[in-house]
């Protein structure tokens, strides 16, 4: 009887700490996305105000090359820092750099007070690249950390909840930013204007991201270590590798600035994750550029552009909360990874068909359709596609979770956005009928390949978990 009571007490303790772990991860993600929602919309509005809308496609292309040195630094840091310390490093760095950029936004010659737009203004490019790297080096590092301490069962049961909390963070910060820009929320000592508005929002986002390490540090101190192992097969494989390296006194295979890239090329499963990411970002870039064009054309000031972008962000985040709670969580538990992965390209194809079909025949305003499709794609990405893709990393070793993932989320994503931007530039001035034909072929090819990749990834993931295998190990 005593043994039974001990077992019952142990189960209750495990459930309590598991709930605490979920609460901390959700709170950290809430803060991360709250900050990201603000800076993401500032990126485009500030860049268009300083450099010009016509250079947005070029910024996406140049970003592909600018971020490579940052990836190489990250790859080295993965070898020397613990997974939690890696997250602390990037959140603190971005918080502090945010304060610096906020200060220079108010500079009379390089910041927003200078209304003479042009490609020669270096600060506008630096600001764009700084914000553009927030996703791969903060949001994606947070995901990599969460994947490394979560099992496949935990991911299926909790990732939908985590996503819902993160979207609530985006909704909260987006609404607060909208109310601030519209002066519903008034700060007595603040002199409102385009410059001060954007400085204040960037400072607020910086304070928010600096609070993330506090939440994660609390979790690491309170939650028992056995609940932070993640996928047990990967944990044991990495322990064996560490012992082998120590006993042989040889450098680990993980060492090397380009090890993340070689890992992508070495394992078809990881290549599939790369392709899954690339396909969405190509499509999203094409639609997003049209959305920015529409936003600027109907706005009269930089603050108005930013406010309208926040409206779109809040709409997307609110849809994402519903999708994460009622869609992601439920579909994953009922139908599994393979079925859900296939839904992503299929639903994307439906939205793209509506976009092309309306562009050809003009049943309703194309402005309305573009904004609806953009918010639909963005909601599906963050509430459905992203948690599915992140789950795919769980049965992989550290080199895949952190190094290959960094190349996928930076180089892969930027490569895709550069491709989408090149498509945008190539189709400028094309007539409506011809553009519809080009879009049909372009989107049709991408969605077809995407479906094939999604099927392969889902099948391989389910087989790996069923066999208790590890992807990325020497025996893979």
Image (cartoon, rainbow, N blue to C red):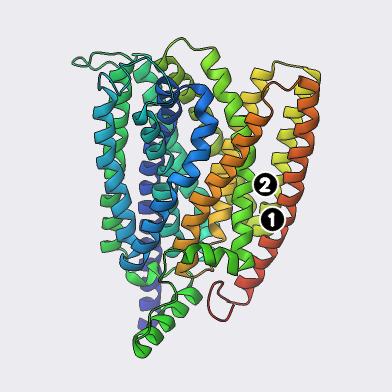
Instruction: Report x, y in % for residue 133.
Output: 41, 44
Q: Residue at x 38, y 29 (%)?
A: 124
Instruction: Return the disc, 1 or 2, that comes first in the chain's sequence.
Output: 2
List the single residue furthest toward the top.
300
Q: Residue at x 43, y 45 (%)?
A: 66
Is label 2 in a helix, a strand or a loop? helix
Q: CA distance from mark 1 to mark 2?
A: 8 Å
Q: Return the residue at label 1.
A: 454
Q: Is residue 180 left or right of residue 45?
A: left
Is label 1 in a helix, a strand or a loop? helix
Mark 1 neighbour class, 10 Å CA radius: few under 14, some 14 to 19, many 20 or more: many
- Mark identifier at residue 344: 2
- Residues under numbered marks 1 and 2 in contact, where contact means CB atoms less than 8 Å apart: yes
Q: Is residue 345 left or right of residue 195?
A: right
State the residue in front, 320 or 236: 236
Instruction: Report x, y in % for residue 245.
Output: 38, 84
Instruction: Report x, y in % for residue 174.
Output: 42, 28
């Amino acid at each position: 009887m005593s043994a039974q009571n001990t077992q019952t007490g142990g189960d209750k303790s495990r459930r309590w700490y598991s709930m605490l772990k979920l609460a901390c991860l959700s709170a950290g993600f809430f803060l991360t996305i709250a900050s990201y929602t603000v800076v993401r919309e500032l990126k485009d509005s500030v860049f268009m105000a300083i450099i010009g809308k016509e250079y947005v496609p070029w910024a996406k292309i140049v970003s592909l090359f600018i971020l490579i040195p940052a990836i190489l630094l990250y790859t080295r840091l993965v070898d020397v820092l613990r997974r939690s310390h890696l997250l602390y490093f990037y959140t603190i760095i971005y918080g502090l750099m945010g304060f610096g950029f906020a200060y220079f936004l108010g500079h009379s010659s390089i910041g927003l007070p200078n209304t003479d737009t042009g490609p020669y203004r270096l600060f506008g490019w630096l600001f764009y690249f700084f914000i553009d790297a927030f996703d791969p080096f903060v949001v994606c590092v947070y995901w990599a950390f969460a994947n490394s301490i979560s099992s496949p069962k935990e991911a299926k049961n909790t990732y939908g909840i985590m996503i819902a909390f993160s979207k609530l963070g985006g909704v909260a910060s987006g609404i607060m930013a909208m109310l601030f820009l519209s002066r519903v929320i008034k700060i007595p000592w603040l002199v409102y204007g385009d410059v001060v508005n954007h400085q204040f929002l960037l400072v607020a986002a910086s304070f928010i991201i600096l609070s993330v390490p506090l939440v994660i540090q609390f979790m690491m101190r309170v939650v028992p270590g056995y609940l932070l192992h993640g996928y047990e097969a990967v944990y044991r494989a990495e322990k064996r590798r560490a012992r082998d390296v120590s006993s042989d006194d040889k450098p680990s295979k993980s060492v090397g600035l380009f090890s993340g890239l070689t890992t992508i090329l070495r394992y078809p499963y990881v290549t599939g994750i790369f392709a899954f990411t690339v396909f969405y970002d190509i499509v999203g870039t094409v639609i997003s550029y049209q959305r920015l064009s529409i936003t600027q054309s109907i706005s009269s000031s930089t603050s108005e552009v930013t406010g309208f972008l926040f409206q779109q962000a809040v709409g997307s985040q609110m849809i994402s909360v519903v999708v994460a709670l009622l869609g992601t969580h439920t579909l994953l538990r009922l139908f599994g990874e393979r079925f859900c992965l296939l839904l992503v390209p299929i639903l994307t194809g439906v939205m793209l068909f509506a976009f092309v079909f309306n562009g050809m025949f003009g049943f309703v305003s194309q402005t309305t359709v573009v904004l609806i499709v953009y918010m639909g794609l963005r909601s599906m990405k963050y509430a459905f596609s992203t948690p599915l893709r992140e789950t795919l990393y769980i049965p992989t070793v550290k080199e895949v979770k952190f190094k290959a993932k960094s190349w996928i989320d930076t180089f892969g994503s930027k490569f895709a956005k550069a491709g989408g931007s090149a498509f945008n530039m190539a189709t400028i001035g094309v007539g409506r009928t011809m553009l519809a034909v080009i879009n049909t072929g372009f989107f049709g090819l991408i969605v077809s390949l995407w479906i094939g990749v999604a099927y392969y990834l889902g099948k391989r993931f389910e087989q790996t978990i069923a066999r208790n295998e590890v992807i990325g190990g020497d025996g893979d």
